[in-house]
Image (cartoon, grey):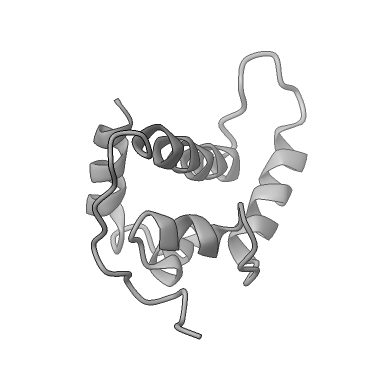
Amino acid sequence: MKSLLVPCQVRRYDADERPYHQLWQAVLFTALKDLQGSAPSGYSDCERRQQEARRWFESQATRVGSLNWICEMNNLDAGSVRRYALGAHGEIAPRVKYLTRSLH
């Protein structure tokens, strides 16, 4: 089984798959916001959200919806994303900006 923590080959998706990938990218960005303590309007339990996001980023799970799975689907190195999210901000920042642009 190939490691989920190495960059995946660049994939080409047809137009029907684009919204599906954008949805999972949005999940990743929501988790980053939760980890930073940026709660949605009207949400009062930021600390609990941060703890849940931290556990999600620290997890090595590979099931659907996990960090590793989302990163593989979007050609991201899960280890780099994890280090970025948990403190090593300079490493993945350009790729995160690229994905942010692709969401709009």
Residue 59 shown left or right of residue 24 in the figure: right
Query: What residue is drawn where x is 44% and y is 75%?
Result: 5
Q: Quadrant of the C terminus?
A: top left
Q: Residue furthest top?
A: 42
Q: Where in the figure is residue 43, as x and y percent of width and height?
A: 71, 21
Query: What residue is drawn where x is 48% and y is 64%?
Result: 82
Query: What residue is drawn where x is 62% and y is 56%?
Result: 64
Q: Is residue 35 above or below residue 23?
A: below
In this view of the protein, which residue sits in the foreground, 31 or 13? 13
Q: Where in the figure is residue 99, as x and y percent of width and height?
A: 30, 43
Residue 28 shown left or right of residue 22 in the figure: right
Q: Residue furthest bottom?
A: 1
Q: Quadrant of residue 36?
A: top right
Query: What residue is drawn where x is 56% and y is 43%?
Result: 31
Q: Where in the figure is residue 98, as x and y percent of width and height?
A: 23, 44
In this view of the protein, which residue sits in the foreground, 71 or 52? 71
